[in-house]
Image (cartoon, rainbow, N blue to C red):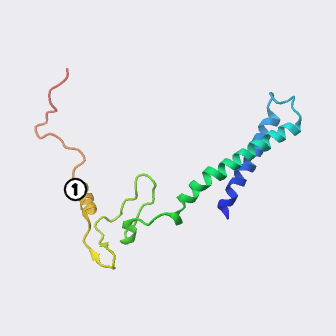
Amino acid sequence: RALQAVPMLYGVTTFVMCALILLKSQATKRLSPWVKAFLAAAIAVVATVCIALFLVPVIHRRLPSRQRPHACAEAGAAVEFQEFPPPQCAAPDAAVTVEGGQSGSPGPAAQAVEAKAEEPALRVPEDDTLGPSAV
């Protein structure tokens, strides 16, 4: 129900803001208040239709109830829900549950995450030289 009210709320907000802009603007002082109200209503109708056609489907697709569960969530590990980058497992060494309810060892992706975590972030040359200088 709330999703159905989104276009109407945008339309009402657009109407109020446009009406205030048109009423307070020096450039529209010559227009009658009825013309200003009609212009604000027309802009609000266009905004309402655009929101209903374009924004509501996007919101509907991004609802958490419409998302597929992540493989880590199925294994019982905590998952950070972010659109970009893809969700990361909080516990990469958690046992993976395969179809049929059997538990297995972590897959190659979890092993790669573990190997990546063990690598040092910055490697320093052994002999304290940084190569030929550019001076």
Tell me residue 10's x, y (percent).
70, 50
Q: How many marks?
A: 1
Is the residue 44 above or below the residue 6 in the image? above
55 or 91, nearer to the observer? 55
- The residue depicted at 30 percent of the width and 70 percent of the height is 94
The residue positioned farthest toward the bottom in the image shown: 101
Residue at image position (33%, 79%) is 100
Specify the amino acid type for callout 1. Glu
Q: Quadrant of residue 4?
A: bottom right
Q: From the top left corner, tell me how far across and down residue 85 is, in percent.
A: 40, 52
- Where residue 90 appears, as percent x and y from the top left, is 36, 63
The crowd level at tag 1 (other Cα within 10 Å; few <14, some 14-19, many 20+) is few
Taking 36 as reference, is 52 above or below it?
below
Q: Taking 3 as reference, is 10 above or below it?
A: above
Seen as rendered, the residue at the extreme left is: 127
Q: Residue at x 72, y 54 (%)?
A: 8
Residue 38, given in percent of the width and then of the height, sits at 83, 41
Assign the N terminus to one quadrant of the image: bottom right
Residue bearing the label numbered 1: 118
Front residue (pair 29, 49): 49
Residue 51 horizontal side relative to residue 80, left or right: right
Front residue (pair 64, 118): 64
Element carrying mark 1: helix
Q: Quadrant of residue 135?
A: top left
